Image (tube, rainbow, N blue to C red):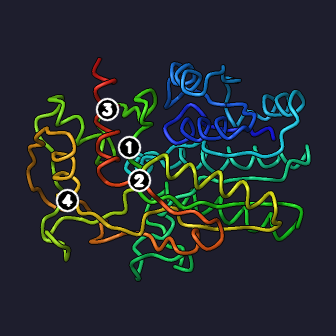
Amino acid sequence: MLILVTGGAGYIGSHAVVELMLAGYDVVVLDNLSNSHGETLQNIGRIVGQEVVFTHGDVRDESLLTALFEQYSFDAVMHFAGLKAVGESVSQPLRYYENNVAGSLTLLRVMDKFNVRQFVFSSSATVYGNPAVVPVPESSPISTTNPYGASKAMVEGILRDLSHSDPEWRIAILRYFNPVGAHPSGLIGEHANGVPNNLMPYIAQVAAGQREYLSVFGSDYATVDGTGVRDYIHVVDLVIGHLRALEFIGQSKGILTCNLGTGQGYSVLQMLKAFELATGHKVPYRLVDRRPGDVDSYYADPAYAEEVLGWRAERSIVQMCQDSWRWQQVLIH
C-alpha cells in the first residue's frame, strides 16, 4: 500500500512515517516545514534504513496536490498537517481555520477527484471541551473552548457528512489526549519552537538548565495533589494506533471515531517527580495561579479503541520520561 502522510516531518507525523515504513508500507511525505525540520526526514531514513520520499508543499495548494495525486497512485492518506497550539489559536483564529479546516477541505476534494477514499484524521481530545464525565468516552458531547479544538471539530463534522454522502469512504477519526516522549533511538522527537506549549518539553528544558524553573498553573484543583491531571500517551503508542486504524478501515466502510489515550491520569507534580526519578535530574518548580479554562482532570476512556482496533497504550510513564530526556540531550548538542 502507498500512503500519503501530510505533515510527515512533524512531531507525530514523523513517528507515524517510521512505524508505517517499518511495517512495510510505502510512504510519500508532504510537509511545508513550517513547524518541522528537513533533518527529521534524514533521521527517519536512518531509523528505517531507506530514504524517505518527500514533497515540499502545503495541503492548501490544490494544484500541487493534484500533481502529486497524478504522479502517485495512493491507497490512503494519513492527515497530520495542521497547526496545534491552543493559546496561539485564540490569538490567531483565522490562521487556524485556514490551515486546519480549509487545508483539510482542499485535501479531501483532491482525494475525492482521484477516488482515494481511505482517510485517517489526526483529531484531538480538545473537541470535548470541558467534559462532564471523566474518563471521557467517545460519546461525550462536542463542546470546544478554543479555535484549535473548534477547527478539529469542524473537520470531524465535514468527515461525517462526507461519509454519509458516499458510503465508499472509509474514515478513521482519532482523538489524541497528550502525546509525549520521542523515538527511543533519540533521532526524532518534538521540536518546541520558542516557549514550549506542552508540559514534557518544558520539564526537559528545565532539567537541562535551559529554563530556571517550571511554572505549575494551579495548586487547588480537586486532584491527588492539587495540580491538574492529564492523560499522557507515548507518541510511539499513539502512532501504532494509527496503523491499527488504517488496517481497520481497509476492511470496513464507514466512519470510525476513537480516543487514543492511556486511560490513566497523572498530575503535573506526578509527571515532574517521575521525570526526576527516570533521569536523575532535578526539576525546580513554582506554584502559580490557574490558567483560565483549565480543568481539574482530563483523561480518556480508551476501551473502544481496544475493542475495535485491538489497540492499547503499552509504554510506561518511565519510558515517556526517559525518551523525552534522551531527545532533549540531542537538541542541546
Q: Separation of disc 1 and disc 3 at Cα?
A: 9 Å
Q: Separation of disc 2 and disc 3 at Cα?
A: 16 Å
Discs 1, 2 touching: Cβ within 8 Å: yes
Q: Is 197 located above or below residue 259 in the figure?
A: above
Image location (x, y in percent) of residue 155: 65, 58
Quarter of image, res 247: bottom right
**Which label's residue is closer to the chain start, 1 or 2?**
1
Badge 4: residue crowd in 10 Å (few <14, some 14–19, many ≥20): some
Q: Is mark 3 on a helix, strand or loop?
A: helix
Q: Quadrant of the C terminus?
A: top left
Closer to the observer: label 3 or label 4?
A: 3
Which residue does the image show at 72% across and 62% down from the upper left? 158
Image location (x, y in percent) of residue 223: 20, 74
Q: Separation of disc 2 and disc 4 at Cα?
A: 17 Å
Q: Is 87 located above or below residue 49 in the figure?
A: below
Q: Is 168 located above or below residue 186 in the figure?
A: below
**Which label's residue is closer to the chain start, 3 or 4?**
4
User: Which residue has dot 4 on it?
Assistant: 270
Q: Is mark 1 on a helix, strand or loop?
A: loop
**Which label's residue is closer to the chain start, 1 or 4?**
1
Q: Is residue 107 left or right of 74 when viewed as pictured?
A: left
Q: Separation of disc 1 and disc 4 at Cα?
A: 16 Å
Closer to the observer: label 1 or label 2?
A: 2
User: Which residue has dot 3 on it?
Assistant: 326
Please name the amino acid that badge 3 sits on.
Arg
